[in-house]
Image (cartoon, grey):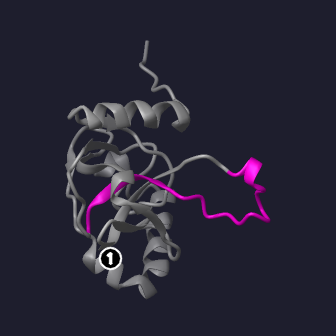
Amino acid sequence: MMNQAKKIDNSVLIPEMAALLHAGKDVRFTPTGVSMRPFIEGGSDIVVLRKKAAVAVGDIALAVVQPAVSAVQHPAAQRPDNVYVLHRVIAVNGDSVTLAGDGNLGGTEHCRMQDVLGTVIRIENAQGRRKCITRGRLWYYIRPCRKWLLKVYRKLLKFGLIGAEHR
């Protein structure tokens, strides 16, 4: 019988991960989503997180961020609780941290240093081979070209020219 990974809701998973990280343990999990493409492929890559005293620009961090919705969209009683992101730190100003997904063409999230639960210390592909962790500086500075590069990347994935079995 093949082992199947269980999907656990973030409202249950993330607080448990936060407790382990706070206790000094490393946490290993498979993120979902495409916001960190091409560096983390949601649903297949595995990341290992560790709690650090402070984060730096270029770190990939799991953080609790404020929901990006207005009171008109969500009255106070219906506002989403916590929003968790695994995104790259693009700025640190004192206690304020700004994050953005590598696969996102616009938009940022903001949190406080204490809202960063852990940072990525290792990325593995589906076969368990380590992937290179970059600081993302070049990727950040070529934002105008990323739209086209991500489009090519998605096409290569679609046609099976790259992917978990090709890494």
Q: Residue at x 42, y 18 (%)?
A: 2
Residue 51, position as x, y percentages in the image: 24, 45
Looking at the image, which is closer to me, 79 or 145? 79
Label 1 CA crowd tier, 10 Å (few <14, some 14–19, many 20+): few
Residue 9, position as x, y percentages in the image: 55, 33
Kind of residue at disc 1: Trp
Q: Give the residue number, with chain letter if any, for mark 1.
A: 139
In this rendering, does residue 37 appear at all? Answer: no
Residue 94, by quadrant, is bottom left
Residue 152 horizontal side relative to residue 45, left or right: right
Looking at the image, which is closer to me, 108 or 30? 108
In this rendering, does residue 23 appear at all? Answer: yes
Q: Residue at x 28, y 37 (%)?
A: 21
Whether the magenta-drawn stretch holds residue 63 is answered as yes
Whether the magenta-drawn stretch holds residue 71 is answered as yes
Magenta segment, which residues?
58-79
